[in-house]
Amino acid sequence: MKIAVLCGGLSSERDVSISTGSCVARALRERGHQVALIDLFLGNEAAAAEPDVLFSSDTDSALYRVGETEPDLDAVRRQRGGESILGPGVIEVCQRAEIVFLALHGAEGENGKVQALLDLYGVMYTGSGYLGSALAMNKALSKTLFRAAGIHTPPGIVLHRGGSLSAEVGFPCVVKPCSGGSSVATAIVREEKDYLPALEAAFSCDEDVLVEKYVKGREVTVGVMDGKAMPVIEIIPKTGFYDYKNKYQAGLTEEICPAPLTEEETARVQRLTEQVYAALKLDAYGRADFLLSEEDGEFYCMEANTLPGMTPTSLIPQMAAAQGLSYGELCEKIIEVSMKKYKK
């Protein structure tokens, strides 16, 4: 099969995306597929003139490691110049493929723009369509849909740049960009003196900021594949919370799969994950993150991820391994279930 793997882009999660892309490309090549790996933002000048050249190359098979901090996007811009998220040769390479494996993460990969663009060109791709992607990326919209579906989510407010900065939620609270990922610019604020600095950091990433009540409890995450929940993972950072560094640096977080929950708790959070998938109109696969509250024993959904991390040690591959799927088999499974939406 001829597959284009689209990664990188101009997002704070760029490094995570490149790491995912290099892993997926190598795994698919090992399973006999023709694979072209291309960066959404940087593109490839040679591929713009001759798109097929990337499908016969395996020089990009070295695995890319994620740094401790987010990448310098200004430095990335200087590599190519311009503000368009689309680099040279990207569309041409995608059009040559039978399907595009989206290894993107963060705003420009998960907010629906790239999905809508590929739809306009008639290009098939993995994961959710533009509508589900947009709904899941905007946490305020997600929370509205969760409540309408009867899914618990932490109460909170949305603050707009230039508007009131009210701390009416109280402390402790969680401050995060409304449309961000990988916990970039996210903070748990326990005292009023730390509130405005946390807002400033979040507003540096987004025009809207979500301030929600802090729910103390166990953090669990559940994947969903083709509408069906996968095994549950409990996430236990060794220090602090599950921030960017703890997510991507080896040894800083313990991830237990299957999570040590009761049978009733496991069934309940898996059922909630399937409800999240339906409420946000997601396709193919995804992941939902929950807190199991110490106070009332309820699961509170924090957010859904439409293109969750896909390095071999990421959460979805761990869940797949618990079901007996190898990493390469999982990559092919994602392609298989993604193609279903084009056969409806």
Image (tube, rainbow, N blue to C red):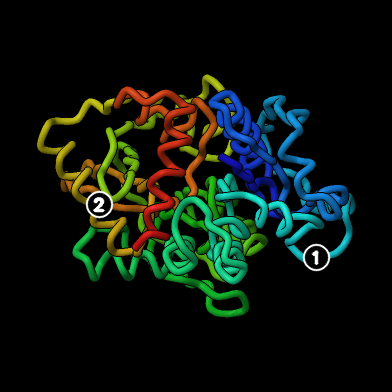
Q: Is residue 249 left or right of residue 168?
A: right
Viewer-closest of 167 and 58: 58
Relative to 106, say whether 66 is above or below. above
Q: Amino acid at mark 2?
A: Glu
Q: Is residue 312 left or right of residue 323?
A: right
Residue 211 in sight in this render: no
In whole angstroms, how far apart are the C-alphas of marks 2 and 1? 37 Å
Which secondary structure lies at badge 2? helix
The residue tagged 1 is 83
Which quarter of the figure is the N terminus placed in?
top right
Quarter-of-image position of residue 177: bottom right
* Quarter location, residue 35: top right
Residue sitting at 46 percent across and 44 percent down?
335
* Number of other residues with Cα within 10 Å of mark 2, as a class: few under 14, some 14 to 19, many 20 or more: many
Label 1 residue SS = loop
Q: Label 2: which residue?
A: 274
Q: Find out whether the residues at labels 2 and 1 contact each other: C-beta distance under 8 Å.
A: no
Q: In the rendering, at what x and y percent does residue 169 appear?
A: 38, 65
What residue appears at the point 48 percent right and 44 percent down from the top-left corner? 308
| Residue 80 percent location from the top left of the image | 88, 54
Image disc number at residue 65? none
